[in-house]
Image (spheres, rainbow, N blue to C red):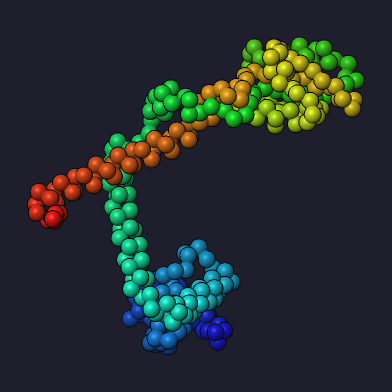
């Protein structure tokens, strides 16, 4: 198998040349012998390899790719030969499966053609909201989600009261929010801000000095800034939004899921409409006949 390696340089040179000039313009010493490998009566040609090499491959990467391509081709041909020997008695079944796959592939390409050409296939934000409002029972949460913030700093910090006041003000305006953020950054405090995205309540708790054995659900019932202290550190945290287990999931959480659902429905509608159209037309033209006893 590896005696092919001695010809790889020639192959790569041919690939480059074939991409820029016609075969009749190639030097004489490169024309004629274009067979790279042979398994039985099947041959692998330079043109086949040339069309398979990605355009962005160069140098050693090209050599590696060609070697792997040749290896895969040889093994594939040997497997086909082995299959012919092992399954010769079920040749008709294999042919049936191949034909069935061919028909399925062509049918799918036809379906995709009409889906791509359809003007009613796009899912809009209005469609998503409408589906969400009429199918809320399908989107019940299996976990509690929260939005909020956590601030961690040295418990000995003397301006902790001012820090808490500033954290409270940060919820009222962008200016106060920036002042608070700058204050945390200047002092090297850890600030985790999840106010703009939903996170699992369990994940939120991992940033606080909590234990697995204790129930922290009561924290969700409290308003405003709460605090914990452990190992010389103080934690300030609050929840800006809470969506409990069993509640309807927020729209932003399920938007992409709904988009996929609607896209699948639209595709099915387009395919079924086309199938009905071609069937009725074929029957009207006498191209299709159904024989009954």
Question: In this rendering, is residue 52 above or below 263?
Answer: below
Q: Which of 57 and 156 is in front in this view?
A: 156
Quadrant of the image occupied by residue 59? bottom right
User: Can residue 14 be seen in this snapshot?
Assistant: no
Question: In this rendering, is residue 95 above or below 117?
Answer: below
Direction front: furthest residue: 293
Q: Which residue is drawn at 82% across and 20% down?
A: 228
- The quarter of the image holding the C terminus is bottom left
Q: In this view, does 240 lie to the left or right of 163?
A: left
How many numbered circles are shown? 0
Q: Which of 174 and 81 is in front in this view?
A: 81
User: Can residue 233 be seen in this snapshot?
Assistant: yes
Question: In this rendering, is residue 55 above or below 82?
Answer: above
Direction left: furthest residue: 285
Q: Where is residue 113 in the image (x, y as percent from the top left)?
A: 29, 49
- The quarter of the image holding the N terminus is bottom right
Q: Which residue is drawn at 68% across and 27% down?
A: 201
Q: Which residue is drawn at 39% across and 35% down?
A: 262
Q: Is residue 209 left or right of residue 109?
A: right
Q: Where is residue 3 in the image (x, y as percent from the top left)?
A: 55, 87
Q: Position of residue 101 (x, y in %)?
A: 35, 62
Quadrant of the image occupied by residue 224? top right
Q: Is residue 39 left or right of residue 63?
A: left
Quadrant of the image occupied by residue 91? bottom left
Q: In this view, does 169 lie to the left or right of 196?
A: right
Q: Where is residue 285 in the image (x, y as percent from the top left)?
A: 9, 52
Q: Nearer the viewer, residue 87 or 83?
A: 87
């Amino acid at each position: 198998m590896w005696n092919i390696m001695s010809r790889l340089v020639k192959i790569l040179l041919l690939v480059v040349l074939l991409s820029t000039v016609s075969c009749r313009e190639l030097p004489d010493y490169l024309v004629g012998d274009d067979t790279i490998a042979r398994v039985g009566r099947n041959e692998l040609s330079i043109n086949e390899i040339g069309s398979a090499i990605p355009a962005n491959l160069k140098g050693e990467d090209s050599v590696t790719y060609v070697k792997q391509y040749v290896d895969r081709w040889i093994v594939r041909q040997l497997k086909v030969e082995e299959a012919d020997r092992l399954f010769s008695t079920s040749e008709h079944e294999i042919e049936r499966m191949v034909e069935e796959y061919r028909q399925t592939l062509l049918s799918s390409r036809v379906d995709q053609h009409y889906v791509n050409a359809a003007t009613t296939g796009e899912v809009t934000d209005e469609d998503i909201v409408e589906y969400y409002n009429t199918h809320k029972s399908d989107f019940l949460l299996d976990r509690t989600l929260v939005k909020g913030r956590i601030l961690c700093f040295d418990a000995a910090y003397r301006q902790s009261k001012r820090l808490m006041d500033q954290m409270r003000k940060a919820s009222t305006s962008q200016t106060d929010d920036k002042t608070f953020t700058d204050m945390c950054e200047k002092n090297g405090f850890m600030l985790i801000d999840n106010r703009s995205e939903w996170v699992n309540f369990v994940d939120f708790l991992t940033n606080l000095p909590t234990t697995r054995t204790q129930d922290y659900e009561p924290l969700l019932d409290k308003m405003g800034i709460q605090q914990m202290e452990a190992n010389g550190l103080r934690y300030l945290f609050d929840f800006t939004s809470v969506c409990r287990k069993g509640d309807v999931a927020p729209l932003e959480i399920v938007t992409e899921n709904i988009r996929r659902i609607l896209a699948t429905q639209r595709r099915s509608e387009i395919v079924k409409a086309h199938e009905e159209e071609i069937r009725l037309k074929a029957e009207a033209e006498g191209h299709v006949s159904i024989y009954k006893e």
